[in-house]
Image (cartoon, rainbow, N blue to C red):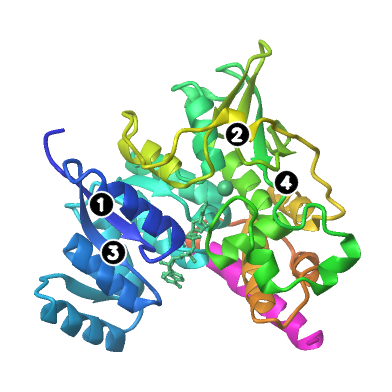
Amino acid sequence: MSRLQQVTVLGATGSVGLSTLDVIARHPDRYQIFALTGFSRLSELLALCVLHSPRFAVVPEAALARGLQDDLRAAGLATQVLVGEAGLCQVAADAEVDTVVAAIVGAAGLRPTLAAVDAGKKILLANKEALVMSGALFMQAVRKSGAVLLPLDSEHNAIFQCMPGDFSRGLSQVGVRRILLTASGGPFRQTPLAELEHVSPDQACAHPNWSMGRKISVDSASMMNKGLELIEACWLFDARPDQVEVVVHPQSVIHSLVDYVDGSVLAQLGNPDMRTPIANALAWPERIDSGVAPLDLFAIARLDFEAPDEQRFPCLRLAREAVEAGNSAPAMLNAANEVAVAAFLERRIRFPQIASIIEDVLAREPVVAVNDLGAVFEADRKARGLAEQWLERNAR
Ligand code: NAD
Ligand code: MG
């Protein structure tokens, strides 16, 4: 490698951000951190800056920026602190940056991720909500700028690894029949349905196989995560919704599969550790050490599969309906879900009410065409307003 790759990590203080920095720290001969961003836990952002000496750090508010800037100076660092969405977009698009890791959670990541896309960067996408919200516009922008979009989501990274290199010609052109998207089923796969009324945020966040941020953990418990991933897969691999089948696989060892017309089914396996897809995407098309332990098939011993239960997990059905409706429906689904998950984490609603809120919002607001980013944010804003109204009507 001739020169160090300059990497911006959007959402560096989060679960994916920290896993990314762990992989990067193993390869100082390849990667250099250009910018780190954080929204809360700014003492951790300071510690990460001390470790990686980035050129820039980004925080949400000017007052926080001043505090961090003083601490960085006191630590002898030349890191410059930028503020807010403008700062995020600047470090995503800077001419010196090669790779942008999009690891902010939720709709807040859309503009900075698109800034990286428009600047033609190599983008490692964890922030699935950004793609779900703006699918067609996002993929058009990728094609226009020539950005390289690589999936970090473990399932999509697995599918990417099992696809032929020229899959962008079209799935039928390259002999792909179906994508099999695996799901762990989360912590409530076997919980008696009546008990779901009483589960706590901490129970919902106790994922059996993965350690993740709280929002995606709740999404995994409701299987909305798989619904968002279904939509994500349709855009990344230009698949129709009926070409993507969800398979519940409780061990999370197979991260997804691709089914070919000749009957071959290719799978990617590995320990459930995000450092594997992160290392794969960082070094692609090469391979580098990720720090993940080798897979011990004898210890795993068996792999189980079952069909998803849409009665238990209505969010999966709602996401399928949203991707079939297209246009503004996925942005509304995502926004209603973000409001509902935040309300559940604040103990304002019960777990099954997450799906009730999303269903109510989607039933109230007609689906409209989204021809520009303004229309995406308008759909997002309307759905958030309707979800807040639901919360006011139904405060528990
Ligand atoms: P997290 O909550 O641990 O981290 C989120 C990061 O985003 C933090 O750095 C936080 O400071 C930042 N952030 C939060 N709100 C922000 C805002 N309004 N503006 C700017 N920054 C903000 O979440 P995570 O688990 O790391 O997930 C990040 C993204 O990756 C999500 O979209 C998630 O769906 C996706 N993802 C995560 C995993 C995983 O294993 N954690 C796996 C696949 C995909
Ligand atoms: Mg995933």
Residue lying at the far front of the rendered structure: 299
Report if residue 220 is visible in the image.
yes
- The kind of residue tagged 4 is Glu
Find out whether residue 381 is within the magenta segment. yes
- The kind of residue tagged 2 is Ala
Identify the residue position indicated by label 4 in the image: 324
Graded by Cα atoms within 10 Å as few (under 14), some (14 to 19) or many (20 or more), the crowding at tag 3 reads many
Identify the residue position indicated by label 2 in the image: 299
Residue lying at the far top of the rendered structure: 262
Task: Find the distance from the CA under tag 1 to the CA under tag 3.
Answer: 9 Å
Q: Is the C-beta separation of discs 1 and 4 under 8 Å?
A: no
**Residue 364's quadrant in the figure?**
bottom right
The residue at the point 61 percent across, 61 percent down is 217
Dot 4 falls on a residue whose secondary structure is helix
Identify the residue position indicated by label 3 in the image: 36
Identify the residue position indicated by label 1 in the image: 7
Which is nearer the eye, 294 or 45? 294
